[in-house]
Image (cartoon, rainbow, N blue to C red):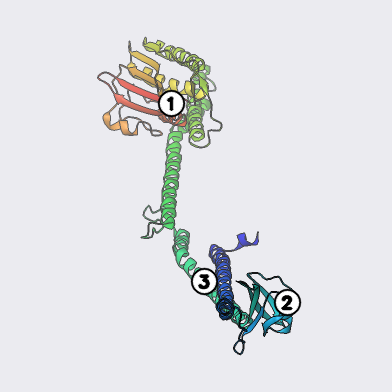
């Protein structure tokens, strides 16, 4: 529609004028109708007053002749079966009332193009029923109504013009903060955290909009900062295995004459490639979980236990090298329960928690996996008897590429994405993930609510 192409200011002004037109028209019609009714009642009252002396005379002096009216009084008095005793009505009005039956009535008619209001009355006397009519010219009322119509039209047009200008000015003033916000938004650098949209002093919708946009700006800046940090961290993490891979390939070129040495260099290169592959897979999985995870999955209790058993089997394979022990305990899970996490994601979550625990326990260590269900949903606990992690590291343990200053295994550790993936999977399912040091070892707790 054409109206949608106009500015908000123009739409407000036009809408206000349209409302004003409707209200003004209704008010003008009501005023005119009231004035017209007042003028008509005035003429009726005057005509009734003209008849009052004749009615009184007929009652008081029934046998005497009726006196004539004063000059300018238009009446006709007609007795039972007689010609009119008094008749000063114009001819056209006389012709109308002369053939009417006596009645208490009021009607309009014209004589010589002039409008009249005629009032009829019936008077009962000993000699019979008398019919009386009086007429009053409505020409002055018509002139007054005509003048009133002109005043109402001119006044309404003037009111609409003033109302339209006032609406335009008020809309301009009301939208001025929006113009300031637009200019400010154009000048925003997007870097300085103190560089925000202005919030007006009034607690109104525009101030709420500014606050919402500032919150959005803060989230965008935080997201951008996270992405920049991720790219920086990823570049840093990729640099080491890439440099190692390049060195290994260069050494492999020098080992073409020594099959055993060449095989060793190729094996080390494969390990570097596996590390790069795991790092890339973790980054892609994080990007998917924090971006658009797609349709909400639904994991049943049976599928959950199947994935848990598979993860425990994989963890036990890892623990063979250190003779570590992996225990698994699962409570009674309702068969109808559903959880908003995919089977592969749930398996990855358990794999990361268990592999971290296995890496921490050392020789003859112990890891416990517990999966319980309560009224709120699923509670997963992974406990180990390793050395734990520094308390200073706990607040950043779930950040990407974060590692404690001293590795729990004493080795280089993984890519630093495992716990970040655990938290991302838990959050995508509507749950939480947390870590805390126990008296012995570390406890990882993940909650996933029921669907």
Q: Is residue 178 above or below residue 277?
A: below
Q: Is residue 44 above or below residue 227?
A: below
Residue at 43%, 50% (x, y): give it: 212
Q: Residue furthest bottom?
A: 71
- Kindly report which numbered mark, 3 or 1, lies closer to the viewer in this rendering: 3
Q: Upstream in the sequence, badge 2 or badge 1?
A: 2
Q: Position of residue 132 (x, y in %)?
A: 64, 76
Tell me the mark number nearer the camera, choosing from 2 and 1.
2
Residue 266 visible in the picture: no
Front residue of this view, candidates 451 and 89: 89
Crowding near the residue tagged with mark 2, few <14, some 14–19, many ≥20 C-alpha atoms within 10 Å: some
Residue 450 higher or lower than 184, as above or below: above
SS state under label 2: helix
Query: How busy is the neighbourhood of tag 3: few (under 14 within 10 Å), some, or many (20 plus)?
Result: some
Image quadrant occupied by the N terminus: bottom right
- Residue 402: x %, y % from top left: 37, 32
Residue sitting at x 51%, y 17%: 303
Q: Nearer the viewer, residue 430 or 325?
A: 430
Looking at the rendered structure, the secondary structure element under dot 1 is strand
Q: Is residue 20 above or below residue 263?
A: below
Q: Which residue is mark 3?
A: 163
- Dot 2 or dot 3: first in sequence order is 2
Q: CA–CA distance between discs 2 and 3?
A: 55 Å
**What residue did someone put label 2 on?**
98
* Residue placed under numbered mark 1 in the picture: 449
The Cα atoms of the two marked residues, 3 and 1, are separated by 58 Å
């Amino acid at each position: 529609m054409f109206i949608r192409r106009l500015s908000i200011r123009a739409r407000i002004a036009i809408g206000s004028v349209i409302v004003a037109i409707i209200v003004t028209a209704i008010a003008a019609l009501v005023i005119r109708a009231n004035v017209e009714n007042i003028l008509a009642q005035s003429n009726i009252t005057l005509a009734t007053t003209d008849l009052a002396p004749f009615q009184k005379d007929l009652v008081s002096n029934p046998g005497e002749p009726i006196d004539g009216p004063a000059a300018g009084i238009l009446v006709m008095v007609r007795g039972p079966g007689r010609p009119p005793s008094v008749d000063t009505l114009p001819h056209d009005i006389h012709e109308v009332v002369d053939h009417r039956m006596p009645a208490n009535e009021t009607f309009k008619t014209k004589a010589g193009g002039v409008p009249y209001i005629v009032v009829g009355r019936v008077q009962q006397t000993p000699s019979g029923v008398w019919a009386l009519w009086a007429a009053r010219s409505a020409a002055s009322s018509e002139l007054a109504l005509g003048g009133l119509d002109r005043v109402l039209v001119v006044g309404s047009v003037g009111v609409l013009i003033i109302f339209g200008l006032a609406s335009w000015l008020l809309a301009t003033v009301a939208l001025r903060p929006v113009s300031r916000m637009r200019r400010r938004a154009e000048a925003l650098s997007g870097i300085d955290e103190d560089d925000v949209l202005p919030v007006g002093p009034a607690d109104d919708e525009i101030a709420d909009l500014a606050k919402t946009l500032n919150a959005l700006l803060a989230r965008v800046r935080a997201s951008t900062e996270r992405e920049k940090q991720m790219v920086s961290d990823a570049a840093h993490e990729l640099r080491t295995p890439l440099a190692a891979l390049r060195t290994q390939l260069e050494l492999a070129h020098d080992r073409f004459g020594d099959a055993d040495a060449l095989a060793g260099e190729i094996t080390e290169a494969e390990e570097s490639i596996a590390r790069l592959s795991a790092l890339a897979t973790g980054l892609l999985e994080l990007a998917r979980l924090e971006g658009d995870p797609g349709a909400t999955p639904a994991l049943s209790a049976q599928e959950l236990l199947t994935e848990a058993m598979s993860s425990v089997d994989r963890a036990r394979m890892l623990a063979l090298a250190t003779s570590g022990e992996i225990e698994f305990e699962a409570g009674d899970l309702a068969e109808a329960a559903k959880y908003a996490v995919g089977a592969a994601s749930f398996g990855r979550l358990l794999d990361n928690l268990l592999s971290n625990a296995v890496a921490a326990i050392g020789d003859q260590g112990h890891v416990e996996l517990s999966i319980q269900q309560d009224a709120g949903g699923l509670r997963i606990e992974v406990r180990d008897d390793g050395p734990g992690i520094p308390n200073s590291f706990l607040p950043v343990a779930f950040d990407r590429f974060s590692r404690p200053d001293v590795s729990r295994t004493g080795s280089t550790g993984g890519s630093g994405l495992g716990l970040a993936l655990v938290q991302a999977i838990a959050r995508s399912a509507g749950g939480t993930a947390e870590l805390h040091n126990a008296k012995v070892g570390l406890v990882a707790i993940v909650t996933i609510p029921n669907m």
